[in-house]
Amino acid sequence: MTFRRSKGREFVTRRLPLTAFIDVTLFLLLYFMLASDFSTQESWLDAALAADRTGAASGDLQPQVVTVGVSNGQPTFRMGDRLLNDRASLEGVLRQLPKQNGVFIKVPGDVPVWVPTMAIQAARDAGFVKVSYVPSK
Amino acid sequence: MRIKRRELAETHLEITPMIDVVLLLIIFFTLTAQFADTLKTPLNLPEEKGAGATEEQGTSAVVVDMTSDGELRLQAAPVSFEEFLHVISRDQKEARASGQPMDLTVRVDRACPATHLNALASALTQLGVRNWKLATASEGAGS
C-alpha cells in the first residue's frame, strides 16, 4: 500500500513558550501590588525657621503673619483682624498680598501639626517662596 | 517506504536567561524596598501635595520622625531630644565645614500637637538651623 501525502503546504506550528512570560508577569504584578500597599508618595514643604519676636519688626513694612488655630476641629487662620475658616479663603487672601517679604506662619502649641502644614501649603500655592514657621508660646 | 520531509529549523527565543535576570531584579528590588521601609516610622503624615515636585525630592541628610505623642525617632530608633540635638549639632558643624546648608526633613504625625514641633523648632533655631522640610503625604495616600 502506498501512502500518499497530500501535496498541500505543510503547516508547522511555531509556538512561543508563553508559560514563562506569564510567570514573570504574575511575579511583577504581585510585586507591584505589594509595593503599592507599602510605599507612600511622600513630598515635603520647605519652611524657614524663625523665632517669635512679636512687635520687633524692623523696617517699614508690617510682617505678614498668619496665626493658625483650631475651632471645633476645623482649622482657623487669623490675619490681622480677619479670621478665615478654610484653606481656600486663606489662599485667596494670600494671593493678593505682596510676595517679596514672605509670610510668617505663627503656630501655637495646642494645634495639631496638620493645621500649620495646611497653612504653609496654602502660602506656597498662593505664590510665596519664603514661608517661615514661627513657634508661638 | 521513505517519507521525505522537509526539515524545518525550529526557531525560538531564548527566554530562560531573561527570566533569570528578571527574577533576580525582582528579588533585589523587593529586598531593598523592604529595607528602605524599615527605616521609616509608619506615620500619618499631613495630607498635602507638598512642594509639588516629588521628583526633585532627594535623599535628605537627616530625616527625623516625630510620632503623634512627640517621640523622636532616627532611622526608626527612638532618640531623646538631647541626643537628637547632639546629632544635629554635629551635622551642622560638618555642613558648615563643607559650605553646604544642612538638609533636615522632619516627618511628623499629623495628629501630633504642635507644641512638640515648636520645641524642636526653637531648639533648632538656637543651634543655627534656619530651614527645614516638613514631610507630607500626597493627598489620598495613607502612610
Image: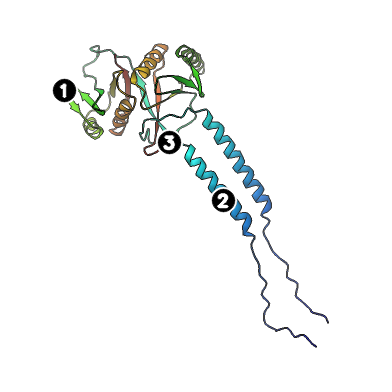
Query: Looking at this view, is B100 or A75 the one in front?
Result: A75
Q: Looking at the picture, tell me which residue is in the foreground, A63 or B26.
A: B26
Residue that carries the numbered disc 1 in the rendered image: A81
Asked where in the image residue A78 lies, by quadrant, the reply is top left
- Element under label 1? loop
Q: Are marks 2 and 3 in contact (CB under 8 Å)?
A: no
For mark 2, does the 10 Å Cα neighbourhood hold few (<14), some (14 to 19), or many (20 or more) residues? Answer: few
Judged left or right of residue B27, residue B140 is left
The disc placed on residue B54 is: 3
Q: Hey, what amino acid is under mark 3? A: Thr
Q: Give me the C-alpha separation between circle 1 and circle 2.
A: 60 Å
Looking at the image, the residue that sits furthest to the left is A81
Q: Position of residue B25 (x, y in %)?
A: 61, 43
Subunit ID for the residue under disc 3: B
Q: Which mark is residue B57?
A: none
Q: Tag 2: residue type?
A: Leu
- Name the amino acid type tagged 1: Asp
For label 3, count other residues whose C-alpha is less than 10 Å away and answer few (under 14), some (14-19) or many (20+). Answer: some
Mark earlier in primary sequence (1, 2) = 2
Residue for badge 2? A26
